[in-house]
Amino acid sequence: MDTKQIQETIQMVQEDNFDIRTVTMGISLLDTIGGSVEETAHNVYQKITNYAKDLVAVAEQIEREYGVPITNKRIAVTPVALIAGQADEESILAIAHALDDAAKAVGVDFIGGYSALVQKGFTKGDLALIKSLPRALTETDVVMSSVNIASSKAGMNLDAVKLMGETVKAITDKSDTANAKMVVFANAVEDNPFMAGAFHGVSEPDVVINVGVSGPGVVKRALDQVKGASITTVAETIKKTAFKITRVGQLVGSLAAERLRVPFGIVDLSLAPTPARGDSVAEVLEAIGLEQVGAHGTTAALMMLNDAVKKGGVMASQQVGGLSGAFIPVSEDAGMIDAVKADTLSLAKLEAMTSVCSVGLDMIAVPGDTAATTISAIIADEAAIGMQNNKTTAVRILPTNGAKVGDMIDYGGLLGTAPVMPTVPASSAELINRGGHIPAPIHSFKN
Amino acid sequence: MIRAVVTVVGQDQTGIVAGIATALAKHEVNILDLSQTIMDRNFTMSMLVALNGSEDFNTVQAALKEAGEAMAVTVHVQREEIFDTMARV
């Protein structure tokens, strides 16, 4: 019995906010397509409530036996546009409600996959889904949505970029907070357990368990032990810590899969912050040596952090997947909020950081009068970074009607509070209104 | 057989080991290893135990929590694998 190891493990949970952020069950909906949209919606409800009926109870029992909190239990499903080819923007809402009802019936926190993949063009179902988003996201409570508008292989669908800018604004007109439930992707991954972007890719098995671990607090404490040491030591310390965190994810995921009798998919070893102090990626970056996140050097520190997290996690798990790295949402991270308030962290710097983080511009509040084409242009910039660098990028942006720069907007719970940030006032309308398709970058032709 | 680690932390006082051990015995839990020390005037104890009896994990966990509360100490019961997993591949 190694008491030092026991104490270290207990400290990680009790003092450093270590948690398994989510156990996410991926469920294929490809066999639920019925003769009508209503029939499909009925089948969707039946399949989810059947497959996921024990998910929450099993996760809670694991939590209890092993003493590691599992913060969220979630479900990810096949992108709904794929099973709604015959739907229009009205009738597809039946499926959104079926997802919401099924998720509530089995007691999960969120259900993701009200999604469309339109990087190369739209089907009828894709358009129906996107146009239904303002209603779908405000008439349901726990349904999460994502739309993939670009990939390194297919290029960028600028018509979709334009449409998503307009959609974000249309959602804002119905609710100040519903945009927190939708993310616009480039190079979306098919096994991501994190929200809002989780969906169950078409190449996935019928059902699978994926796990997302967190733990910026644990990394921060480890870095506090190596103050003044060289950056080589810092990278090594992060790697070792990520290893330990991921091992717990591996254990919890394999236990959950075994007890639910479904295959175990991947561990997503992301440093995902929560609004709680001490559970912040910004504080990790500051522990590396920045007075405040956003200072010059932030991109370098983040690159090293993201890479070291991946390297530490790869050995610790049978299969690493999802987004894996460091998330940099603003509203969900106390240190990021402080830096924006202090004018240390700008939208431009955040964009630079997304070229080396694991996702993108996340949970950023902007004024309600931001033009739709400006939002589209922010999405296009972000997608271009992803396409060119073969990485996932995403935009989850939150315009709020009546809000001015500096106002604080509260999204509730894990979604946190965001200060409204300024965008560049010069117009991008002419670029966005061109429409069409940005071709895939030359280095994508690898075959 | 389930192996678990029991950790006890709290203000030192007479009878903590006896209280926890009695609760364990009552639920047919065998103590395999035990380590106890005083750190910063806090009593800390780790025990490796085996649940041999028919009672399930949840019952034993609840009983130990109750025993801990009676002595104003914090008791955690966690399955052993969590501690092994973190340091080994």
Image (cartoon, rainbow, N blue to C red):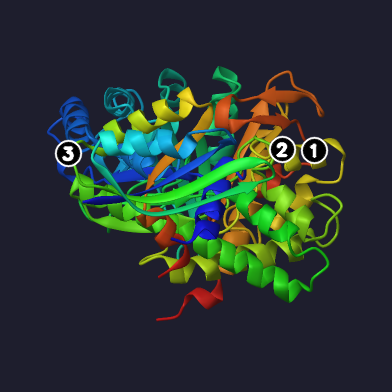
Residue A9 at what x, y percent from top left?
Answer: 52, 52
B36 and A22: which is toward the camera: B36
Q: Amino acid at mark 1?
A: Asp
Residue ID for mark 3: A33
Question: Which quadrant of the figure contains the C terminus of chain A?
Answer: bottom left
Label pair 3/2, CB-CB below 8 angstroms: no
Residue at point 83% right, 35% down? A341
Q: Amino acid at mark 3?
A: Ile
Disc on res. A338: 1
A225 and A124: which is toward the camera: A225
Q: Residue at the far bottom: name it.
A: A447
Image side of residue A84 versus residue A429, left or right: left
Disc on res. A177: none
A426 and A262: which is toward the camera: A262
Which quadrant of the structure image shows residue A16?
A: top right
Q: Secondary structure at mark 1?
A: helix
Real-space Cα separation, disc 3 to disc 1, in angstroms: 48 Å
Q: Give the crowd class for mark 1: few <14, some 14-19, many >=20 residues within 10 Å.
A: some
Label pair 2/1, CB-CB below 8 angstroms: yes
Residue B77 at what x, y percent from top left?
Answer: 40, 41
Image side of residue B4 versus residue A333, left or right: left
Disc on res. A334: 2
